């Protein structure tokens, strides 16, 4: 229970930070991430027990496509790293769907969300520091 609370708090703070300090593309990424979280939550609550995994995989695949488009349009590096970590999550999701008897694959699929959020937060933090340093530099 404490892990779920800590993870939820980390998620809310990470997305809130990205929304507050991010650019227009960063905010688009936040909207896509929140939409994917909502889709995953709905699938977990309303899908039949054996049907949630393919629905979550579909939601994750759509998020991967959206973040990849944002990464290609952005001048920042964090969306590329986020897309890479999320690609690993989708890969493990495909493996979990192909091998449902190996339950640990679903755990590995969910794990990659944490490093993806970490690179988002640190990427935005470093971008802000670089922008502040560039603004202080004499022209």
Image (tube, helix red, strand yellow):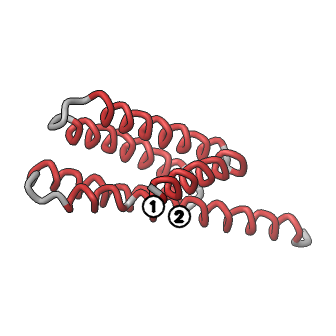
In the figure, residue 121 lies in which quadrant? bottom right
**Closer to the camera, 68 or 58?**
58
Q: Is residue 80 visible?
A: no
| Mark 1 surroundings within 10 Å by alpha-carbon count, few (fewer than 14), some (14 through 19), many (20 or more) | some
Taking the spot 44% from the left edge, 47% from the top edge, the residue there is: 67
In the image, 104 versus 23, the foreground residue is: 104
Residue 65 visible within the image:
yes
Q: Quadrant location of the N terminus? A: bottom left
Residue designated by label 2? 118
In the image, what residue occupies the spot 33% across and 38% down?
A: 59
Return the residue at label 1. Answer: 114
Q: Residues within 10 Å of mark 2 (few under 14, many from 20)?
A: some
Residues tagged 1 and 2 counted as in contact (Cβ below 8 A)? yes
Q: What element does badge 2 sit on?
A: helix
The quadrant of the image that shows the C terminus is bottom right
Front residue of this view, candidates 76 and 50: 50
Coordinates of residue 34 in the picture (x, y in percent): 50, 39
**Label 1's element?**
helix
Q: Residue at x 8, y 55 (%)?
A: 101
The CA distance from mark 1 to mark 2 is 6 Å
Horizontal side of residue 10 vs 44, given as left or right: right
Coordinates of residue 75 in the picture (x, y in percent): 59, 56
């Amino acid at each position: 229970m404490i892990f779920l609370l800590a993870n939820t708090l980390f998620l809310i703070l990470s997305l809130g930070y990205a929304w507050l300090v991010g650019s227009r593309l960063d905010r688009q990424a936040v909207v896509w991430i929140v939409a994917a979280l909502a889709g995953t939550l709905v699938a977990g609550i309303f899908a039949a027990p054996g049907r949630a995994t393919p629905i979550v995989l579909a939601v994750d695949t759509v998020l991967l496509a959206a973040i990849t488009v944002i990464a290609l349009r952005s001048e920042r590096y964090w969306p590329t790293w986020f897309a890479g970590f999320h690609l690993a999550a989708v890969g493990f999701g495909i493996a979990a769907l192909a091998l449902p008897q190996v339950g640990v694959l679903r755990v590995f699929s969910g794990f990659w969300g944490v490093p993806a959020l970490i690179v988002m937060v640190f990427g935005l933090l470093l971008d802000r520091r670089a922008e502040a340093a560039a603004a202080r530099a004499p022209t």
